[in-house]
Amino acid sequence: MSVDANADARRNILARVRHALKVGEDDASRAAAADAYVAAHAQGPRPAMAVDLVARFVHRAHDMSSTLERVSARDQIPHAVARYIDALALPDALAAQKSRLGVCWPEFGDLDWDGAGLSIEARPTQGHDRLGITGAFCAIAETGTLVLTTSASTPTATALLPDTHVAVLHASRIVSGMEEAFARVRAEHPGLPRAINLISGPSRTGDIEQTIVLGAHGPFRVHILLLPD
């Protein structure tokens, strides 16, 4: 089918829809009402949320098979990552050594990784890195979900390709629900980012005999370092 034929088919379908709805093609009032509805960001019914959003997020993150450690200061991040890697039940010494090699977002490039015995480079992953360290735009208490927005300084692949994803999150960036998360994206980004990634624990699938398998389409592990406000 040609491009012109596709366009004609689309116009015919939309004409039939407008006829069924008894609206004109250039009904300005309906278009204005639709624009107003979208701009209002109306919310439907929502479950009650605990007052302590941090505690709620921690609980739900664990439900999603993420692990979490509270870190009191930014300069403690490298040693917290090293402790986590050393505690993993990896199959052999070679796996442990490889897992101490990784990449991080540029904002963490100034940290003393060498002092923690880690070889971390501030660059996008090239696909073979075993460890990826990122920040988080915000997090959702209702579901234990990390929200990452993509940009040149926050490459998505760092969170998706390595076996282990470590995310650094500030407690002040935890919001109640998805509605608040997207409101914050709209408020803090001059235009929507190219991609918004919602990460609720390690990658998983139940496609094979309804058995949950972690790491099927991404990291086997998600570890969160929670910094104070």
Image: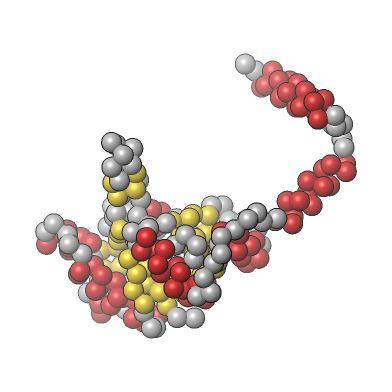
Residue 44: percent from the left, percent from the top? 65, 54
Identify which residue is drawn at 37% across, 72% down: 225
Q: Residue furthest left?
A: 92
Residue 134: percent from the left, percent from the top? 41, 65
Quadrant for the N terminus, please. top right
Query: Depth check: 147 or 158 in front?
Result: 147
Residue 134 is at least partly visible in this image: no
Identify which residue is drawn at 33% across, 59% down: 65
Residue 211: percent from the left, percent from the top? 28, 42
Q: Is residue 22 above or below residue 176?
A: above
Residue 38: percent from the left, percent from the top? 73, 51
Toward which corner of the image does residue 68 lie, by quadrant?
bottom left
Q: Is residue 121 above or below residue 25?
A: below
Query: Depth check: 85 or 98 in front?
Result: 85
Identify which residue is drawn at 40% across, 74% down: 226
Residue 227 is at least partly visible in this image: yes
In the picture, measured across the screen, residue 28 lies left or right of residue 185, that is right
